[in-house]
Amino acid sequence: MPTDMTVNGEARRSARDPLTPLIDVLRDEFHLTGAKPVCREGFCGACTVLVDGEPTVSCLTPVGLVGGCDVVTIEGISSGGGLTDIQSRLEQGDAVQCGMCFPGMVMALSHFLAHTPRPSRDEVRAALTGNICRCTGYERIVEAALAVAAARAEVRR
Ligand code: FES
Ligand code: FES
């Protein structure tokens, strides 16, 4: 039975078995390869996408469960097609090396900063507990997130 959903604003239909992990549908069927299948066990966060606005590990989510849902991947995170402020700040701050964690980090931070506009350092750290980075270390990522929050606050003033 096919599964209908919206992916990055477009209506999409998956012909895969409803038990197929969402990440395999995104990557293999829809050719959206931003989300990374690293652990496939739900603990690294590299496969994180937004489902109805909530960060979701797509490796453990059967596609049948997202029928009728709004899915956003790293490819759809920017409305204009360029980099978001989070992506830019992570790059500028040398907070990314191999890049495997990067899409999941961006998705998690996008959700977190949208709901916590003036976070503390500890709150940023807590928000990233589901996202593992094996190369960069977390301090630069935390610094980048705080810088984004500060820049957004400045714009709002
Ligand atoms: S690949 Fe999904 S959580 Fe690691
Ligand atoms: S930059 Fe390599 S895992 Fe984070």
Image (cartoon, helix red, strand yellow):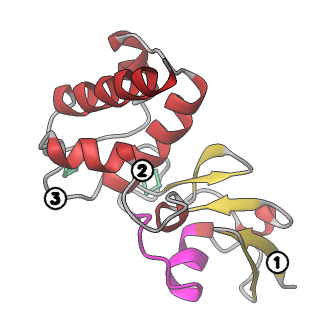
Residue 116 location, quadrant: top right
Q: Position of residue 85 (x, y in %)?
A: 37, 44
Asked if the beta carbon under badge 3 is closer than 8 A to the nearest atom of ligand 2, the reply is yes
Q: Residue furthest front?
A: 157
Choose between 40 and 139: the one closer to the eye.
139
Residue picked out by circle 3: 98
Residue picked out by circle 2: 104
Q: Residue at the spot x=24%, y=43% of the render?
A: 90
Residue picked out by circle 1: 3
In the rendered image, the vertical position of residue 46 relative to residue 108, given as above or below: below
Left or right side of 75 for 13? right
The first of marks 1 and 2 along the sequence is: 1
Question: Dot 3 lies on which element?
Answer: loop
Left or right side of 154 for 97? left
**What is the span of residues highlighted in magenta in the rendered image?**
23-37
Disc 1/disc 3 C-alpha distance (Å): 33 Å
Q: Residue at the spot x=42%, y=50% of the render?
A: 104
Which label number is shown at residue 51? Answer: none
The first of marks 1 and 3 along the sequence is: 1
In the rendered image, the vertical position of residue 17 relative to residue 111, given as above or below: below
Q: Position of residue 28 (x, y in %)?
A: 52, 85
Verify CB contact (< 8 Å) between mark 3 and mark 2. no
Hey, what amino acid is under mark 2? Gly
Q: Residue at the spot x=27%, y=58% of the render?
A: 100
Disc 1/disc 2 C-alpha distance (Å): 24 Å
Left or right side of 14 for 98? left
Q: Residues within 10 Å of mark 1 (few under 14, many from 20)?
A: some
Choose between 142 and 38: the one closer to the eye.
142
Question: Dot 2 lies on which element?
Answer: helix
Answer with the quadrant where ligand 1 appears in the image: bottom left
Hey, what amino acid is under mark 1? Thr
Question: Dot 1 lies on which element?
Answer: strand
